[in-house]
Image (cartoon, rainbow, N blue to C red):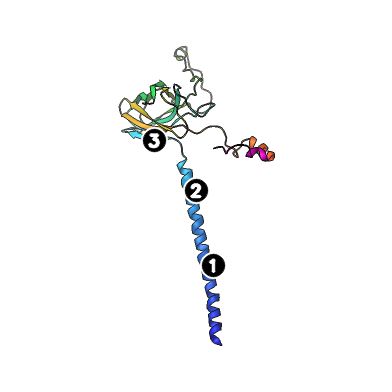
Amino acid sequence: MSRPQHSKAGRLRLAPVAIALGATVALTGCAAGQQAETSEENAAIFGENAEVRNMAVRDATFTFPEGEPVYPAGATAPIDVVLVNEQALRSDRLLSVSSPYADSGRVTGTTVIPGGTRLYSDGVPPGASPQPPTPPDKAASGPADPEPVGPVQRPQVNIALVGLTQAIRPGVTVPVTFTFEQAGSVTVQVPIGPTAEPRPGHGSPNVAGQAQGGSESHGGGQGHG
């Protein structure tokens, strides 16, 4: 009569162990899912980096095109990039940019990068004009007027590929060579940067209307946000 009781007690003791093991497996699965999602988010970072001697090319992208998300053949593609002089005591100069996928490269504005400083190219969309430089005779006309209080203006250069030999679309990278006077040349695989337009669900005013419209959101294919 006692054996069935011991067997039943053994099964009761095993039940909490099985539940604990099941919870451990579930938690492990959740952790694995979170890690995979994080890896995908990190992989979506835009901009390419490269170094040559004392010069570093950081976050190089083509400015997202206005209108259609493509630079057609023959177009001019502005480049957003940060050029960092990591040698504190020696200046360098950006001489040129070039690519086998463009007729020429264009560099205007400030090209000297003093030691330990950065030079920024924010890109100029096709059809737009860069900010005109300060007239040289303004400083010689007398005592300088006090500068308005605000953010310090950073050194600016405008870089672009002119006369593309083929279309550039999001997801495509193009080799661009930066040539410096002291450091030499380095080639970077440059993609198209992110759009400045808000994605659906991230502050877009059309999202609420689409949600209320119901079947309108099912009329076409899925977008890529």
Ranked by sequence position, the earlier of labels 3 and 2 is 2
Q: Amino acid at mark 1?
A: Ile
Disc 1, SS: helix
Q: Is residue 151 left or right of residue 112?
A: right
The answer, for residue 170, to whether it is visible in the render is yes
- What residue appears at the point 51 percent right and 18 percent down from the top-left corner? 145
The quarter of the rendered structure image containing the N terminus is: bottom right
The answer to whether residue 91 is seen in the rendering is no
* Amino acid residing under circle 3: Asn
Q: Which residues are magenta?
A: 214-222
For the residues marked 3 and 1, what is the alpha-carbon distance in whole angstroms? 49 Å
Q: Which mark is residue 19?
A: 1
Q: Is residue 221 magenta?
A: yes
Q: Residue 129: percent from the left, percent from the top?
A: 49, 19
Mark 2: amino acid: Glu
Return the x and y of residue 15 as percentages of the image width and height: 54, 72
Quadrant housing the C terminus: top right
Residue 74 in which image quadrant: top left
As displayed, is residue 164 above or below residue 6? above
The correct choice, above or below, for 28 with respect to 45 in the image is below
Tag nearer the camera, 3 or 2: 2
